[in-house]
Image (tube, rainbow, N blue to C red):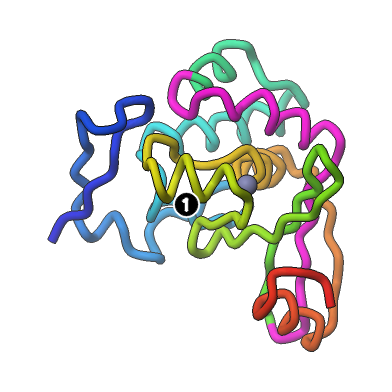
Amino acid sequence: MYFILKEPHQAGSGHILLPRQFCGSDYFLGPKGLKMGSFLPAVAEQLLADIQRTYEDTAHIPDDLLIALTFVLGSCVLPALDLVDRRSVSRLSSPSGRSVFQVVGGSGRVYTCLTSCHFCPCPSFAYAVLHRGGALMCKHLLAVYLSQAMGVTQQDAVTDQHMTALLSRGTLP
Ligand SMILES: [Zn+2]
């Protein structure tokens, strides 16, 4: 069984065929245990892993990695880095073991991102990823992945009730 992913920046043309075993939720634990293999091409996973390794050593992301990331993921890279620089990404965890990421967008609006199913509720994700299908992710979701890779995600504990409200409504109670 194969899943078909569109190649970045080639909407409507070239596709990558991924064997089913590489699309399972248990495949590939990315930076800080993020599961990304289900949704990203291997090259994007590798770039994020390289960024994590390099950033741990140098607290810096080299230009060649940023250029490569932009080539693969497109124009969302710089806005995502801006969100990371502003420490806009938080990981909310509840005693039940569930966790979600929240990203404060440029307008101040808070987006609850679900990395377990690679989803952001923003209009850009709905249009560019889900509807048009030419993009792999929005700036908020990439900010989550980058923030995790760089180890700068803010950690917040919430109650189970709070988590339930977040997951059912996607907003703060
Ligand atoms: Zn988004």
Closest to the observer, 79 or 12: 12
Magenta stretch? 71-96
Position above or below: 14 against 142: above
Q: Which secondary structure lies at badge 1?
A: loop
Closest to the observer, 10 or 43: 10
Position of the C terminus by quadrant:
bottom right
- Is the distance from the Cβ of mark 1 to the nearest ligand 1 atom less than 8 Å? no
- Is 93 left or right of 129, judged from the image as shown? right
Residue 129 x, y percent position in the rendering: 45, 44
Closest to the observer, 130 or 46: 130
Residue 75 x, y percent position in the rendering: 56, 23
Closest to the observer, 1 or 50: 1
Position above or below: 173 against 87: below
Position of the N terminus by quadrant:
bottom left
Residue 31 x, y percent position in the rendering: 59, 47
Q: Residue at x 63, y 36 (%)?
A: 52
Instruction: Say which quarter of the image contains residue 41.
Output: top left
Residue 90 x, y percent position in the rendering: 80, 55
Instruction: Say which quarter of the image contains residue 88.
Output: top right
Amino acid type of the residue that numbered disc 1 sits on in the rendered structure: Met
Position above or below: 44 against 93: above
Residue, disc 1: 36
Would residue 37 be counted in the magenta stretch? Answer: no
Residue pushed farthest top?
Answer: 63
Position above or below: 173 against 127: below
Q: Residue at x 16, y 55 (%)?
A: 2
Residue pushed farthest left?
Answer: 1
- Is 8 left or right of 34, judged from the image as shown? left
Would residue 89 be counted in the magenta stretch? Answer: yes
Q: Residue at x 31, y 57 (%)?
A: 23
